[in-house]
């Protein structure tokens, strides 16, 4: 059973290239690109932080996919915030 991001967080659609430019500008390094996820990481305060660009279907918008940036800090699965 996998934990999901906190329900109260509102995710905002963002263009993939804008997302990647923003991440690279902020010093994040690409870690892996696997399926619908692009994962970037950096070390802050002695711990690794991850940024995940997540692609998922958004048929109601009339486009096949939209990407979100989600930042995960620490080691718990419920600390998700918009970058």
Image: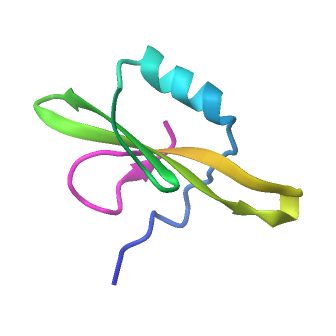
Q: Is residue 22 above or below residue 40?
A: above
Q: Main secondary structure of the magenta part?
A: loop
Q: Position of residue 44 (x, y in %)?
A: 20, 28
Quarter of the image where the N terminus is located: bottom left
Q: Is residue 75 above or below residue 27?
A: below
Task: Identify which residue is drawn at 10% across, 31% down.
Answer: 46
Q: Is residue 68 above or below residue 17?
A: below
Q: Position of residue 39 (x, y in %)?
A: 38, 43
Return the residue found at the far left: 46
| Residue 64 occupies quadrant | bottom right
Q: Going by the image, does 15 lie left or right of 77?
A: right
Q: Going by the image, does 10 lie left or right of 80?
A: right
Q: Position of residue 27 (x, y in %)?
A: 35, 18
**Which range is magenta?**
71-83
Colouring mode (rainbow / by chain / secondary structure / one colour) = rainbow
Task: Identify which residue is drawn at 58% across, 31% down.
Answer: 19
| Residue 58 occupies quadrant | bottom right
Q: Going by the image, does 59 lie left or right of 27?
A: right
Task: Identify which residue is drawn at 59% across, 53% down.
Answer: 55
| Residue 62 occupies quadrant | bottom right
Return the residue found at the far bottom: 1
Q: Is residue 65 above or below residue 13?
A: below
Q: Is residue 7 magenta?
A: no
Return the residue found at the far right: 62
Task: Identify which residue is drawn at 55% across, 62% down.
Answer: 8
Q: Going by the image, does 19 lie left or right of 64?
A: left
Front residue (pair 11, 31): 31
Q: How many marks?
A: 0
Q: Position of residue 69 (x, y in %)?
A: 53, 42
């Amino acid at each position: 059973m996998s934990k999901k991001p906190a329900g109260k967080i509102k995710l905002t659609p963002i263009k993939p290239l804008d997302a990647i430019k923003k991440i690279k500008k902020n010093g994040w390094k690409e870690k892996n690109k696997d399926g619908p996820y692009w994962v970037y990481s950096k070390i802050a305060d002695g711990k690794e932080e991850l940024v995940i660009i997540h692609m998922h279907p958004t048929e109601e918008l009339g486009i096949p996919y939209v990407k979100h940036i989600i930042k995960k800090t620490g080691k718990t699965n419920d600390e998700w915030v918009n970058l």
